[in-house]
Amino acid sequence: MEDGAMAAEPAYLEMRGISKNYGGVHALTDVDFAARRGSIHAVLGENGAGKSTLIKIVSGVVAPTRGTMSLDGAPATFGSPLEANAAGIVCIFQELSLMPDLSVADNISITDPPRNRLGLIDTRAQRRRAEELLARVGCEDIDPRERLKNLPLSRRQMVEIAKALGRNPKLLILDEATSALTSADVKKVYSILHALREEGLCLLYISHRMHEIEELADTASVFRNGRHIATFAKGAHSDDEIVQMMIGRDWSNVFPKKPERTAAPEPALEVSNLNWAPTLKRLSLSVGKGEIVGIGGLDGQGQRELLLALFGVLRGVSGSIKVNGAPVAIGSPAAAKRPENAIALIPEDRKTEGLLLPMSVAENITIAALPWLTKGLVIDRSAEAEKIREMVARMQIKVGDLDAPVATLSGGNQQKVVIAKWLLTGARIILLNDPTRGIDVGTKQEIYQLLRSLAAEGAAILFYTTDYDELIGCCDRVLILYDGAIVRELAGTEITETNIVASSLNLPGEGAAA
Amino acid sequence: MKTLRLILTQNLGLILAVVLFVALYSIYVALHPNWGLNVVLQNGNETLALIFVGMAQTMAVLVGGLDLSVGPLMTLTNCFGSHVMAGTGGSVVAGVVACLALGSACGCLNGCIIVYGRIQPIIATLATGAIYIGLALLLRPTPGGAIDGDLAWAFTNDINELGMTYGWWGDLGLFGKIPAQPIFLALVVVLVWAPFKRSATGRGAYAIGSNAHAAYMSGVRIDRSKIAAFTLAGFFAACAGVYLTMQMGSGNADAPQAAEYTLRSIATVVIGGTSLYGGSGGVIGTIFGALVLRSISFIFRVVPGDSTFGFVASPLLQPFFEGLILLFAVSLGAARVFRVRNRLSLFT
């Protein structure tokens, strides 16, 4: 699939046989990748396809497990971002690399400030430099003396771009660099990028927005499951073909059978016009008793915030939430778990938000349900022990000693402890935030069975996952979020990988021409 | 107009400390029966060591840590100084330099333990602080030693005495009556702090406190900046020790005094508007923070015991009022909590 013009010009960045393993997880497997000067090269792939790992290797944040990299024909290995910077590689990360308490000018010249004869930072020259760079990205309105934290997110992103330009990059990497920009700024950034291409820079552009890639890129590479699938010139493939390349995993039938539904279920959770600026926008949904509703979409479209809002973690949320038909105001997780609401959230990161790692397995299992296990002022130890036994048996948690720290369990068993903790509270509405990330297939399967049996007992389940197979296999309905709003609802046979990927990119899916 | 607004909003903490100091010191002046330059001189002598220790603490706080060894380090240099500053002439100068070098080396050791040992600053300095007190006790098991009397007199007095003791200059009139401590302080600020703040290393220290992750990703030399910050903390603590030695004329391994200075140093940093999260503020605010703390204790000395406020002004209540002022200053800094929209960010 190599394009003729590409073969003619030698590659600037060349990666050969690059692999990266994190423990047993293969983030990248035997990747060959090349990019040339004077080109905007788009890198495409689903969540977890290996794009971020690729750019982390190029920019010196992580070292590859195997493989070689060369720049302009010379071998290159970087031990830190500093070394990559010195070689002319500059990266604009999705999570900004800016210091909130420093001024805009300080941030722009953080590593190489202009100095005076005494070797001290020349603040006036630094300010002029910041003004020039800001003017170059069309942001003359930003005062270089302003503290960064006082700027809105979209302006900060422009500062990040100005900072990158100030480092005179030869290879510029943009990782979702336009996600927070206003459309006027996006136009400016496009014209800068086109100009940089004319100057002969090599640009790597990572974006989830298909139309951006069409407008900008001249070459594209697709990654899937840590492997490089194809590299081709712009226009060589249609959107549909590219989406097909991004999908295409084999998946075995590990999911329990979905029940046939004759009538719409009685709603347990109804949300309407949920707003939390700037992330959630007029979001409405309902989850019925006995229903598993999936939330899909690309990372960072407001899924996490939606669950946090429902669980009472966010402040300043507007809109109405009804539990079993009655309007509720949930101000904290403690309020969410009260019997009248009975909401549970299985968090995304069990190590930081789910478990008290140094405490014992037993203490972790009962920590959320203690109000119901207390007699007078003290914890009823025998009732607690009884409940713990019950849960360990029900969840089939493989644990030798209940008093051992929960950190000693495997990832899958840790996740079971988190779920057991919430089941003990008697939750009837269960919110899950990507609960199967980083756990083994066997435990995943047990979790799918458990979710289905909880639903069969009448629980309402709202299930955010980045794994499309889970949306397809587990969920009765799937809501696709894009930019903080639900752009599509899929049900029954509509839940296909093609539809999910297409609507995640906010493209019209199959049979959705209307 | 824009410039003024920027200066105001970016230095709120400092401005608050200055206003507090002016208000409290005015009360003191108004109540003092015969306030004059000689009183200012005495005030300066009681404040300068605390200012230096506070500046030392500021360095640790800027990079997002706390340094519990600043007080002990002051005491160590005091005991060391009572030995090496005992001669006359050139050897005294060498002694002062040796004290400052010792402090900087101890600070650098703190920094290396924190950076290469990956130990939290508060724990690392808890341990090294105890070590420094131990060394001080070795040097001065009992209070004692006597440094050069001329030196002690000249450097804790006004400009006239400083010049006339050594024959550098004669009576300079009214100008000569100005206490010398502000000049020493200004020298340290201009020659040490200002260059540091305007160096790439100093900028790095601010960057670490503001967002260590982003600083690393930007290619900031994190380790170097951190070690430099703690080294400078040691240097400032040594300045306090040297001044204390000149003031007392002897050395005393006073552990309770060291602990008190450490705790007060944290208060001066906070009142001076440096964020305990790191990344914003600086030593100028701390100077005024120390002045505020000291002004409170000065006021207690001059409130007439038989007045309406006499019972409030009991010296026993001094810690109570210092606590109130500290709480007030910290509350203003904690106002950000009201703007947090994701409660999870309260815990990070």
Image: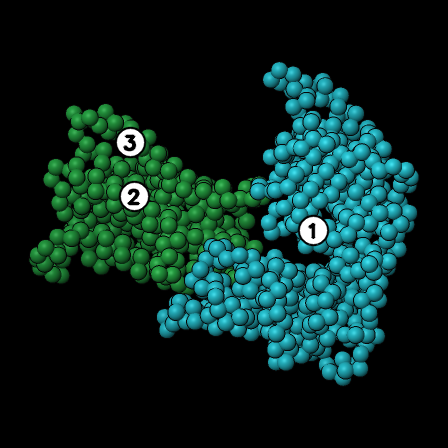
**Tag 3 residue:** B318
CA separation, marks 3 and 2?
17 Å
Circle 1 or circle 3, nearest the eye? 1
Above or below, A373 against A297 in this view is above
Q: Which chain carries label 3?
A: B
Count of numbered badges drawn on the protein: 3
Residue A145, quarter of the rendered image: bottom left
- Choose between A299 and A32: the one closer to the eye: A299
Look at the numbered disc 2 and give the secondary structure of its residue: helix
Circles 3 and 2, Cβ within 8 Å, touching? The answer is no
- Choose between B38 and B113: the one closer to the eye: B38
- On the same chain, marks 2 and 1? The answer is no
Q: Mark 2 lies on which chain?
A: B
Q: Specify the amino acid type for callout 3.
A: Gln
- Choose between A479 and A84: the one closer to the eye: A479
**Tag 1 residue:** A485
Query: Residue B66 at what x, y percent from top left?
Result: 44, 45
Image quarter in which the C terminus of chain B is found: top right
- On the same chain, marks 1 and 3? The answer is no
Q: Which colour scheme is used?
A: by chain
Q: Which of marks 3 and 2 is nearer the N terminus?
A: 2
Residue A464, quarter of the rendered image: top right
Q: Chain A is drawn in which colour?
A: cyan
- On the same chain, marks 3 and 2? The answer is yes
Query: Residue A110 at what x, y percent from top left?
Result: 49, 64
Give the crowd class for mark 2: few <14, some 14-19, many >=20 residues within 10 Å.
many
Look at the numbered disc 1 and give the secondary structure of its residue: strand
Q: Which residue is drawn at 54% across and 61% down?
A: A155
Q: Identify the mark at residue B20; answer none if there is no mark.
A: 2
Answer with left or right where residue B208 lies relative to residue A195.
Answer: left
Q: Which residue is drawn at 61% across and 57% down?
A: A95
Instruction: Specify the chain shown as green.
Output: B
